[in-house]
Amino acid sequence: MTTSGRISQSVFDGSRLRVILLLDLYEGAQQQFLDAYEHMRNQVASVPGHISDQLCQSIENPSQWLITSEWESAPPFLAWVNSEEHVETVRPMHSCVRDTRSMRYSILRETSPTHPHTATTAPEVPARVGDGVARHALTFTVKPGSESKVAEHLSKYKSPEARVDDNTRLRRTSLFMHGNRVVRAVEVEGDLLAALRHVARQPGVRAVEEAINPYLEQDRDLTDPDSARVFFTRAALPAVHHVVADRPEPAGLRRHALYFPAKTGHGMELARFLADQDEAAAEDPDSPVYRSTVFQRDDTVMRLIDLTGELDTDPFASLGIKGPRKAAELERLLDGAAIGVEGSLETERNVNRLLSHTDMMPVTDRTSADS
């Protein structure tokens, strides 16, 4: 089998998922942690898509623990880990844990239990081709009427030093607003968690975060580890799909963010729909969309695209609805009332209106000088 040179990273490949959570406990907190884990284990056992989990303790350092879990695929895990139920379920663990690190892996090959010396693989789930960059976004809302003040503060955000350590660098930070919703997308070469912690420690960044605190709809206290943890857990907007066309990067690419609020319960389906359209666009040499990342949490979906020309030159391609019945499918999944565009998307007028209503306002878009 020949692997395509096109970059494509996705949670929608159908493979089973292995989640690894590394924890460093405070001394004396082991029993409290075990009680919290039992509660969490009982809760997660009934979550659709969950297969199994294990709790392990280091034989070298008793304060280091490991939780592994297996899921039918990535989407049900992401639906669970980004839910309010999960936030409340893991809250009792916060006071036990000094540090955590979460890693998620697709299961591509494994040893068969009936044939212990045979490695098995699912041929329909090939290894993906990445570009060494991790992508993540945060989203939160501010109090209506404060949008211009928040945008002013955020535009003063000073880019931190790109180099985090020998293996990690900040590549790009793109910040957008749509009404009272803020989205900050980051691209990191190396360790995403290390980069996020690096950014959070910068005095200039902390000053901007403190300046917008009074305007947030969800209260937070960044000096309180529990308050900060809950806020950033709720604000997480994971990248669920990323694709880059297999052709030389065109000059003069323009970055846009499009906001797609889904109908209740259809966020993951809408994200998958947009991912499929972007895969098709990457195969089309005439598509203006060169690079795309889809972010999704619950019913909030955001699509970050780098394209040639103006956004409205080809509105169907820009919206990811090029092809028969694609507009009707988006109409079925999109909360048109929330975006201010109701009615059939089969008309060019409504498609153009939707494009203008989904287009997010750019606040900052900064590429690190040494990336």
Image: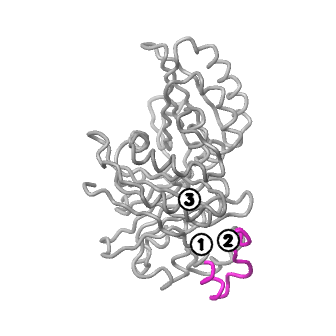
Residue at 50% across, 55% down: 10
Residue at 51% across, 67% down: 257
2 or 1: tag closer to the N-terminus: 2
Location of mark 3 (residue): 182
Q: What's the mark number on residue 57?
A: none
User: Which residues are drawn in magenta?
Assistant: 335-354
Residue 40 coordinates in the image, percent (x, y)? 68, 29
Quadrant of the rendering where the C terminus is positioned: bottom left
Q: Is residue 5 magenta?
A: no
Residue 36 coordinates in the image, percent (x, y)? 66, 23
Q: Identity of the amino acid at label 1?
A: Thr
- The residue lying furthest to the top in this view is 28
Q: What's the mark number on residue 339?
A: 2
Mark 3 or 2, which is nearer the eye? 3
Residue at 59% across, 25% down: 54
Against 113, residue 302 (above or below) is below
Q: For the residue labelled by badge 2, is the local secondary structure a helix, a strand or a loop?
A: helix
Q: Is residue 338 magenta?
A: yes
Q: Identity of the amino acid at label 3?
A: Val
Q: What's the mark number on residue 358?
A: 1
Residue 9 coordinates in the image, percent (x, y)? 45, 55
Q: How many marks?
A: 3
Q: Quadrant of residue 41?
A: top right
Q: Depth check: 77 or 280 in front?
A: 77
On the question of residue 126 being in view, the answer is yes
> Does the CB distance between marks 2 and 1 fall below 8 Å?
yes
Quadrant of the rendering where the N terminus is positioned: bottom left
Residue 262 coordinates in the image, percent (x, y)? 68, 63
Residue at 45% across, 44% down: 206
